[in-house]
Image (spheres, grey):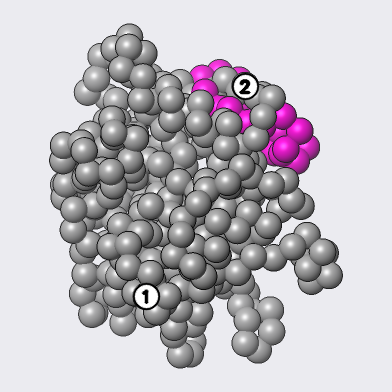
Amino acid sequence: MHYFSTNGLSTFVSFREAVLGGQPGDLGLYFPGEIPILPADTLKGLDRRSEPEIAHEIIRPYVGGEIPDDELFDICVETVDFPIPLVEVTQSISALELFHGPTLAFKDVGARFMSRCLGYFTRERSEKTIVVVATSGDTGGAVAAGFHGIRDVEVIILFPKGAVSDVQELQLTTLGGNVTTLEVRGTFDDCQALAKRALADTDLQARVHLTSANSINVARWLPQQFYYFFAMRQWDGEPPVFAVPSGNFGNLAAGLLAYTSGLSAAGFIAACNANDVVPRYMRDGNYEPRPSIATLSNAMDVGAPSNFVRILELFRDRVPTITECLTAVSITDLQTEDTM
């Protein structure tokens, strides 16, 4: 498997190079050169396989043999070693509970997978790897916990001042060791811009090896496909519509990638708060990132969602094709409060 940049100006790289590099030099995002189509017996036999077995079968084509199969399976076991139940809410709505991991965040899966991949790849390197990550709440805690204690890897976390919950701030700031956390006077978009600028700084990269643990990194992004297959493993009925809370759009982009690989789904809903850049794009075809707006759902306060370019790449920028399987909606704080 090779990976190319969504901006189309960087050379093709391997999975290992994409993980270690984090982001292409042209400031695009790495995207797989081909989308593997899962065998029919895999898709029909999800309920006969364990979650680590499903995870291993999904991710193996993307790794392309760069981690031995037995070690990759062990990584998958450690990645999903907590419950991910599908719980009935009403007769027509079920919720996949992704908060049973060590930091109560859905990003525990991707952070644990990436940290162990990076730990494997750094064994053969003489230099230390520094992971730079911007967070609006969930990502930082999951990355801090996932990477804490990983040998020869240091983590730098940037978070916006006053924009994460008390629990999230404690998760970010209390581990110590190889995890350093910096509070930024600004928004998540400011934190993300700082991280991207550092990763693209050739002078800095010449002195230290930097990579990212945001869903910019393919090893953080690709494992999010697991959720959808785990949901279908427990689902009994016609193909469902997946409604996905959407901030930086990594989760939804992974779901649509899984759909392209053969996952059964009747459609997807991008559930957004007042940061409505994608709902506006779906209406008029114009993608215009804006400064983020602070809302009650702070982890989704993203005005320039990085991963949407992966959705555009998946559908070759064709809005009519995207709208065949994706609907995007924007919900106000008042609607959120009323629903709760």
| Boundaries of the magenta span | 156-178
User: x, y percentage for residue 144?
Assistant: 55, 32
Three-letter amino acid code at the position of disc 1 = Pro
Left or right: residue 312 versus residue 9 is: right
| Crowdedness near tag 2: few (<14), some (14–19) or many (≥20) residues, C-alpha within 10 Å | some
Secondary element under disc 2, as helix, strand or loop, is: strand
Instruction: Report the front residue among 155 and 135.
Output: 135
Which numbered disc, 2 or 1, marks the residue that appears first in the sequence? 2
Element marked by disc 1: helix
Q: Which residue is mark 2?
A: 182
Q: Residue at x 38, y 52 (%)?
A: 309
Q: Is residue 157 magenta?
A: yes
Seen in the picture, residue 47 relative to 340 is either above or below; the reply is: below
* Amino acid type, residue under disc 2 in the picture: Leu
Against 317, residue 307 (above or below) is above
Percent position (x, y) of residue 157? 56, 27
* Residue displayed at 21% across by 69% down: 37
Circles 2 and 1, Cβ within 8 Å, touching? The answer is no
